[in-house]
Amino acid sequence: MICSRAGSFACASTDILKNVKFSSEYVARALGRLGVDASDEILIAVSGGTDSLALLHAVCGLGWSFVRAVHINHGLQPQAGAWGRQVCDAAAAMGVPCEVVAVTVVRTKSGPEADARAARYRALAAYMRPREVVMTAHHANDQAETVLLRLMRGTGPAGLSGMAAIRPFGAGRLARPVLDLPKAALVAYAARHALAAVQDPSNDDRRYARNYVRHVLIPAITARWPQGLYAINRAARHARADTDLLSQYVARDVAACTAPGGALQLPALRALGSAVQGPVVRAWLAGRGGPPMSEAKVAEVLSALAVVPRSRRQVLRLGPAGALLRYRDQVVWEPGAEVAPGGPVREVWAPPFADLALGDGRRLRALAGLGQGIAVSRIAGGPLTVATRTFGQKVFVPGRGHRDVKRLLQEMGIAPWDRPRVILICAGEVLIAVADHWVCAPWQARPDEPGLVFHIES
């Protein structure tokens, strides 16, 4: 930290002053603060623009051993192929291997900018190696643009915190080491080293929201408030600090509301204050790999879950990403547009009960356990029948007579969407176990008796 004049307490980080010079040393210091060093494998995302070329060149100046580059070809411009070749040539001149990855941008209601960004990050996550650090050249101007765009969408504190300097991503991490640096510093560096950048004409099209913010709003703000760019970035850092603190408290509530199997427990959620329920649902869903939810969508979900349907089940779809499935007082997240029930199973399983493939990526195992599961002495003489249930099916349960399978699974608390995949294990016509859920009492192993535990592995 430095002060603007002697005796003054108006201090600012040297990393966001206009006269700071971008260099390899700057990158090394910035990465060190992010916990990244020469022992890490680095993948630099290079668009070919001034910013990413400057970052690539500066990282090459560090002399680190494990550095490579990738260029994402969105296929949205006629010159896209030539840009990819130009980037690879530039990287080769710096001694860095580079590949071009072509993507298909799927158009959605989110708009072309968001669609291209989503395709780009999906490609980066798929291309990176385990524990690799993906590096982008997002800078202070980009951060200010992001904060202003999110503000116009009415975002909350998490959105106003902007882009994170480092975060988990794909099989490793995503780092933005120049996030506190103004674009001008990168442009000056590129000029000093005569780096020939790609010129994408779409970057000047003010019909796109980010371009409008970049070419119209930011200049207007800085003309009136010369330090406006840095003030926006400072506000983003304050918002991130507050959000990080809040997330620690929310994480505790999420843990208290989550069942051992990962389901959201509604009684525990309802016990929280109404202002806390929304953040908890968002954080729980994010932890399950679900999509972010808007304020309106969170309110809609909470309102739906407040009603107890007669069937005690609900399916709340969150677009193509998947659905929230509620049964009784628990909610689970199922990725994908539809809940896949899996195919029917009916197999004869004979001793010594080797692992049995169930045809949907799962396998049934018989694990030995003293005093656990089915008594070996009861089933050693013959094969078992392994099957999924069928409509209207009844089974004989010793001591309880013939029972409807649907009612039996209801008693076990098995959700309707899980029932088609439940595996019934029968000896002849007698149900003796439901894999991972239940063992019929007359067949259970005594405490000192060898047994078999029927377990399904995905």
Image (spheres, helix red, strand yellow):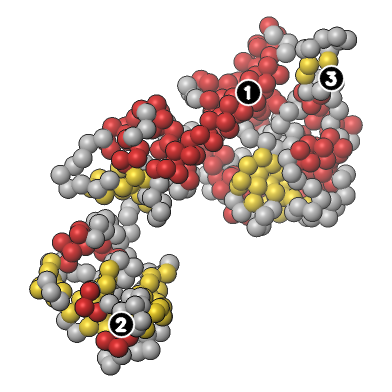
Residue named by callout 3? 2
Q: Residues within 10 Å of mark 1 (few under 14, many from 20)?
A: some
Q: In which quadrant is the N terminus drawn? A: top right
Relative to 17, residue 412 above or below: below
Q: Nearer the viewer, mark 2 or mark 1?
A: 2
Residue 238 tag number = 1
Residue named by callout 2? 375
Disc 3 residue type?
Answer: Ile
Q: Residue at x 18, y 79 (%)?
A: 430
The local secondary structure at tag 1 comes to helix
Q: Position of residue 415 (x, y in %)?
A: 26, 55
Q: Earlier in the sequence, mark 2 or mark 1?
A: 1
Relative to 15, residue 310 above or below: below
The local secondary structure at tag 2 comes to strand
Q: Residues within 10 Å of mark 3 (few under 14, many from 20)?
A: few
Q: Position of residue 422 (x, y in %)?
A: 28, 66
Disc 1 residue type?
Answer: His
Q: Nearer the viewer, residue 276 or 212?
A: 276
Q: Residue furthest top?
A: 224
